[in-house]
Amino acid sequence: MLLGKYRILIVDDDIDLRDFFCDALNLFGYDVAIATSHAEAISKSKEEDFDLILQDVILDNWGCNGLDLLKEYKQIKPAIKVVIISGFAGNISWDTFKEAGAVTLWRKPISLAYMQEQLKVILK
């Protein structure tokens, strides 16, 4: 599959971070979609085929948490790859997310170079 053919869903309740990830992924040549709510994230994951979901761990503005949302994706499409993104390193248990099916954890701040290299590995 060519780089530009990979579809990535960005799930974050922070509009500035959604825009950052969207701009970066478009720059890298990926086909990008965004979810602006819990319901939209679930709806898009059901209705569309994504190669990867990039999701923030804390979704306070949506009334849900990243772990519950991850579990919902995995019930819908068990093979979907999900990267969890967190700026609060001490507040989450990576093992819990890994057991729920997350591929990896990215800690904020994330450089463009790191993101690009990680995506190449995850999507191969």
Image (tube, helix red, strand yellow):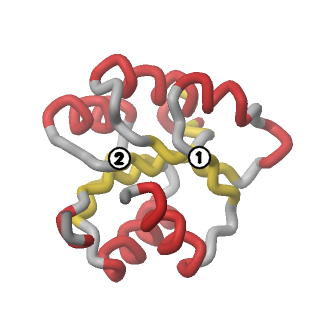
Q: Eyeballing the image, is 25 above or below 105? A: below
Residue type for callout 2: Thr
Pinpoint residue 53: horizontal percent, then vertical percent.
39, 46
Residue 120 located left or right of residue 104: left
Q: Earlier in the sequence, mark 2 or mark 1?
A: 2
Q: Position of residue 85 (x, y in %)?
A: 59, 50
- Say which of marks 2 and 1 sits in front: 1
Name the residue at 63% across, 48% down.
105
Q: Within the image, what quadrant is residue 48 found in?
A: top left
- Label 2: which secondary element: loop
Q: Position of residue 120 (x, y in %)?
A: 43, 67
Residue 114, relative to residue 18: is it above or below? below
Residue drawn at x 27%, y 77% as measured from the top left: 29
Q: Quadrant of the C terminus?
A: bottom left
For disc 1, the marked residue is 104
Residue placed farthest to the top in the image?
A: 75
Q: Nearer the viewer, residue 51 or 71?
A: 51
Mark 1, other Cα within 10 Å: few <14 / some 14–19 / many ≥20: some
Q: Secondary structure at mark 1?
A: strand
Q: Which residue is mark 2?
A: 36
Which residue occupies the extreme left position in the image?
A: 47
Residue drawn at point x = 34 percent, y = 31 percent: 79
Residue 5 horizontal side relative to residue 64, left or right: left
Q: Residue at x 32, y 47 (%)?
A: 35
Amino acid on which disc 1 is placed: Thr
Residue 116 picture location, percent across and down: 48, 74
Using a 10 Å C-alpha cutoff, classify the residue at mark 2 as few (fewer than 14 neighbours), some (14 to 19) or many (20 or more).
some
Q: CA distance from mark 2 to mark 1?
A: 22 Å
